Image: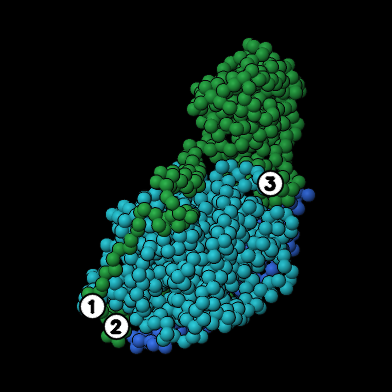
Chain colours: A blue, B green, C cyan
Amino acid sequence: MQVHRFEKVWLGAAILLIVGFIATIAYGSVGVGVGMVDDSGGQISAQEVQNGNTGTHFDDPGVVKTGDDKYTVYVVARQFQFVPGSGDNPVQVPAGANVTFRVTSADVVHGFSVVETNINTMVIPGQVSEVSARFNEPGTYGLICHEYCGAAHHTMGGSVEVVPPEEYDMQQENIDQSADDAQAQEEADQ
Amino acid sequence: MALSRRQFVGAAAGTAALAATGTATAQEEPDYGGWFDDVSNYDGTADKRGQDTVTITVGAQGNNGAFAFDPPAVMVSPGTEVVWEWSGEGGGHNVVSDGDGPLDSGSPVSEAGTTYSHTFESEGMFKYVCVPHKSLGMKGAVVVRPGGSGDGGSGGQQQQGPPENPDYGGWFDDVSNYDGTTVDRTDADSVEISVGAQGNNGAFAFDPPAVRVTPGTEVTWTWTGEGGGHNVVSDGDGPLDSGGAVSEAGTTYSHTFEEMGVYKYACVPHKSLGMKGAVVVGGPLGGSGGGSGGGSEQEGSGIELSGPQWLLSGSILLAFFSPLLFAVAMRRRQNGRPPQTGEGGELQRATGPEPVEEAAETEPAVELGHDEYDPKGTAALVAFYFVLIGLLWVFMYFVEFLGRVSIIG
Amino acid sequence: MVFVDSYPKTSKIVRSEFIVAFVALGIGALFGVIQALHRTGVFRGFISSADYYTILTGHGVLLALVFTTFFISGLFTWAVANSLERELPHRIAWSGFWIMLTGTVLAAVSIIGGLVGAPSILGHDLKADVLFTFYAPLKAHPAFYIGAALIIVGSWIAGLAYFKALWEWRSENPDERIPLQTFMVLTTMLMWYVSTIGVAVEVVAFLIPWSLGLIQNVDPLLTRTLFWYFGHPVVYFWLMPAYLVWYTILPKLAGGRLFSDPLARVVFVAFLLLSTPVGFHHQYTDPGIPSGYKFIAMTNTMFLLLPSLLTAFTVVASVEHGARQRGAKGYLSWLRNLPWGKPAFAGCMLAGLMFAAGGFSGMINAGMNINYLIHNTIWVPGHFHLTVGTAFALTAMAISYWLVPQITGKKLRQRSIATLQPYVWFVGMALMSNAMHRAGLAGIPRRTAEPTYDEFAFEGVAGTVGEMRIQIAIGGFLLFVGAAMFLIVMTDTLLARRGGTLSVNSNIPEPLSGADHSPRILDNYKLWTAIALLLIVIAYGPPLASMVADGLFAPGSPPIPV
């Protein structure tokens, strides 16, 4: 085969480029520790999610504290909102903590993307997407469904509020407190 | 013709109801302040005053799917229990007051048969939405107002027939001989409409296209014999069907309308030309007439398009048929050619009288063989590209990508 | 002899396929400009935001499936007849054409149904707002799926005609090397047969019975995976015909000769081998797929850059050869000695230039974890409007200026419009695509009628969101103008009388390094197909097996009509 010497050099350069790309990505995975969305979330019945009888946290989705500085956020995506996340029900997590999002769909394929971060996953009925992240800076991040899910897809958004840890703990106490108050009130009424 | 239930109830109350409305207090349409602007199945407020419980369907057809409350707007007496019942369609729905308000059915559920109820004691207007589908127009309102026939329990006074200017929902947009008026024949016992009148670029019209009659009137369609075969068939479900298209002059078809409503019909072969008509039965009575909107929006009224959509659909249709037009043009051109001798079309073309030649091949100024040519310009360009994408890659990966909050497992 | 006189029967097939492709291009471009104006908020009067998705589905299907498949069938039909110097078996070719056309009409009618109130046909609402990827469990009218299946089946049958022509030629020329154009066509078709199995199984075994109610559930992850088994090779099905043009016709238009025939063959074989076992790179962010398979797909994808990088060199070197033969000197000044005023040449070159940019954004897409940065943002349409939307589409339009006169025997009309057209397209695409890429980095999603949210606002990373919007709207409008200019030229040319001296010459000079310099094993299709299948089994076997291990239809989703 007749190959011009320039072409041989270019072939070598191209292979170098490709190997360089693969090496960078491997470094990102192993060196920096960027994880991939995979099958670790397990499976779930979409109809049970829809009807709220999965027997898991998806029946009453929200933030669950799972350990010191560890939180799991259960999110149900449905036409056309995230619960929690959409409207005046933002996802609230403390800054600096290890936050695991467990996201699933009650109906069709959705997307789950926290704007300007690398938290970006598909939400497929029957599968649970599990991704962990740590938000170091307090602030409000946009949350969007980035896969077409029906006629009002464009309205399916939300927000993630990252609050300073002290503030977060105080809020939680208040919520617990008010819940306790309500219970006390109820008992008093009886 | 599918009449909505309340309409049917009203009509079943008979002409007595029609007479009664004359004396009943005219119901004024509440001012919702644009709340229902994007709600496709809203056509006025259903007056359910005097009933103890009122049911509203959640997930009824509307708003491009099962994203509607039915009826979207209802008027009830104080103390009425309103029950929302889930149809099970359109995914998860809920019933939540707009702003501060008493309604909150909780998070969305989709199961058919789910119900949620609330008893309205105080007067006022209560707007509510399905939170997930609010943007689609899944909105409703309950108006609590005393009065109506409620106290007497005679019920069903709400039916007053279609208003003075019925909303035909675009039905007459392409009908050339409809001038915006509905001819009033409420004084006549029998009414005649000619089939194949002049209009719509030929004898493709009903005359008059829109006519109002009182319940019990016999309407007779009479064929003019022009414009080819015509028939009279209801749009969607409806009572009118004269059978297959006939063209003979003097043919007649008649129907006696007992129930109030708007009856749209068309000549099937010429519907697309605009050969369409409507018979309005009952009304108009009492000023703004009929808060219930008396069937101005018939179910199954078929395809309705707004202005720009006509434009769009028209151009798409044109584009679809353009190959056909093109083929016709080609055929005409071919026919225009002088006859040729030969065995078949292809051969004719090959030996035809219009020979075709290619442009002459341009000879290169310099002949360069493989061994005399080094692509050094190319080498420079690809080297530049190599450096460029290498730098861009490093920037994208290490600055843009790794600079953000990342997934850590 | 002009092609139309040498092969009148084949010319008629090519003409018919081109006409369908051009009509699809016209409607698709109209849908495109409506979207560009709606999405950017410049003008929303045509459609409601709910109808946006109908228009988007139509745009995707008509351009990415109908325009491409029909144009490619036409181009391949011409290329095989031209390089084997014989008429194609016309019965097979015509049946392929009619089946594809039936499928197109079914799919198009079910999409358009969504614009006219979705009348109920055969118990299902006539609409198909499911977009080009038709992910279950959103359900379209069954006619949409049947139409899509027929388009694929029709293309299979059209492909048989090329193989039959080769066998006939081979029996007369037992010892000759397969001519380069035919070699490219057949390699592409082999890849197409191997890769369309995925979508055929998805549609025929799952979606059609499911949409008709014969089966209750489908597994959304499995059907997605089958779609993307086909969804990446299909982009090479669009690209390889553009490469065919760049390798075999562009050098001649530049006044030169192909630099290397053997490397061209190597490149096409590499595509046959590597195009399919890479589909998981569209599913990097999917749950339910172990990351090991994603890594395998990533390395395969990266090596797929190799044939494209080699193509860049060979094609540019061939064009440079043309400039040198015109007497050019210097490192870069030879670029001036090229026929930039000829629309066929200018279009192909601008398409290639845009592809170099699109190639880079493709490398980001392919990078397993960096994909998070841009997955499902408007970056992705920014990318594929450079590849299929320019590398393929602009090449197709450009080469039509050269090819249509030959298959009709009519001189190209409206030459001044034709000369300007590639530049209009280039400017429009440069505006639209750069803004889309930057908007994607800001996180703005694709496939949405109104990219604004109640809960937060986007901030531009490079430039402002408002400026990107305006660029997208202006770019989209210019692209529509570009498509309209092309269609005006084509309509006028097709309606003109035949005769006279054409503006083009069909002669293709011998490559500088010819086929006799390449090893014969390159022509061994059986070997390459077997290796391609083996690579697919390695990449797809285990993950597919684990997806179906828990039942073909589980975890299941019932249909949710759009």
Tags 3 and 2 both on a single chain: no
Which element carries disc 3, helix, strand or loop?
loop
Picture disc at residue B366? 1
Residue at mark 3 to residue at mark 2: CA–CA distance: 66 Å
Q: Secondary structure at mark 2?
A: loop
Relative placement, left or right, of A92 versus C340 is right
Residue type, numbered disc 3: Leu
Q: Give the answer, above or below, for where C272 lies relative to C414.
A: below
Q: Please say whether residue C63 is visible from this viewpoint.
A: no
Residue matched to label 2: B369
The quarter of the picture where residue B400 lies is bottom left
- Name which residue lies at 50% across and 63% down: C73
Q: Residue at x 45, y 84 (%)?
A: A19
Q: Residue at x 32, y 69 (%)?
A: C253
Relative depth, front residue between B6 and B46:
B6
Is residue B330 at least partly visible in the picture? yes
Mark 1 residue crowding within 10 angstroms, few (<14) / some (14–19) / many (20+): few
Pinpoint the chain carrying mark 1: B
Front-most of residues C123 and C348: C348
Mark sitting on residue C122: 3
Quadrant containing the N terminus of chain C in the rendered view: bottom left
